Every structure is written in structure tokens, then in C-alpha cells.
Amino acid sequence: MEQLMFALLIWLGAHTSYVIPNGLPFIEYKSAQELSDMKYGSNYSERRLEVSAIFSDSKKTIYLNKKFDLNNKIDQGILLHELVHYLQMYNALDFKCVEAREPEAYQLTHAWSQEQGIGDPFQDPIFKLLLLQLAKCPNF
């Protein structure tokens, strides 16, 4: 896992102006339900999107689904996405809201996915519209 994370950080360093830290974030594995509860709250009845992973700034931890497969390129893209959030935090970027961090993470994941030959995992036009709305920091 460490080798993969360093490789992804090197890729991100080559494709952004971020300062790349020497250390890595912590990794913890959670069930799909636990990830959903972390994102939306355990009493939140309406789930918006399936949660594959979460980055916690305060704990410097990436939470991955227990089914994460180190050798699966789509799962690697999910990890890369969360590493973007790690770099955003490490580089002390200021965002109007947490959701405003997402477009950059998805754009970089898209670019990496294209390089890996796995296409655009986010090609659904409705998803892209939702992403644009999230970046405007709506009140949920």
C-alpha cells in the first residue's frame, strides 16, 4: 500500500503544483455502511451517492472500503482521489466549503484514469452536474 501511495503522490506532484509531503496519511478500512454513516450520519435517511472512501483532515486518515483491491485500477483511482484531499490539506488550501475541494480531485482522477486506459469513471452527465452544484457549496 505504501509503494502505491508514494507512486500516486509522485504522479500528483508531476500534475500539480502541490508540495508533496515526506509522510503518508493513515489508512483505515470500513464497511460500505460505516463509510456512508461517516459521510451522511447514521440517522440520515437519504443517501446521495455511494461512498467509496473518505479523507479526514483532522485525523489525516483515508478511510477505504474493506473491499478495496490494491491491484484494481478503479480502486487505485479512488485512493488517488483521496490523496488529492490529503495534498489539499497538507498545502493548507482554503475552500469555501468541503464540497468545493471535489472538482479538482475528480479532474485529477479523470486524468489519471485516462493515462491508465480505464476511461472516465465519472462519465455520467448527471454526476457531473451534481459535482458542479457541490462546488457551489449548497446547504444540505
Image: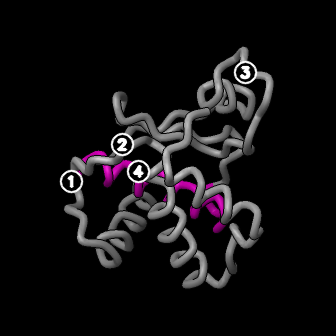
Where 134 sits versus 46, above or below?
below
Stretch of the chain drawn in magenta: 70-91
C-alpha separation, residue under disc 3 versus residue under disc 4: 24 Å
Residue nearest the viewer, comparing 89 with 95: 95
**Alpha carbons under labels 4 and 2: distance apart:** 10 Å
Report how far apart the C-alphas of labels 1 and 2 lie in the structure: 10 Å
What residue does disc 4 label? 85
Identify which amino acid the numbered label 2 is placed on.
Pro
- Residue at image position (58%, 60%) is 132
Q: Separation of disc 3 and disc 2 at Cα?
A: 28 Å
Of discs 4 and 2, which sits in the foreground?
Answer: 4
| Mark 2 residue element | loop
Q: Residue at x 65, y 84 (%)?
A: 117
Q: Name the residue under label 3.
A: 44
Query: In the picture, which quadrant includes the C terminus?
Result: top right
Disc number for residue 22 = 1
Task: Determine crowd level at label 4: few under 14, some 14-19, many 20+ residues with C-alpha closer than 10 A.
Answer: many
Q: Is residue 57 left or right of residue 36?
A: left
| Amino acid of disc 1 | Asn
Q: What residue type is labelled 4?
A: His
**Residue tagged 2:** 25
Tag 3 secondary structure: loop
Residue 21 seen in the current view: yes
3 sits to left or right of 131? left
Location of residue 131 in the rendering, given as x and y in whole percent from the top left corner? 61, 58
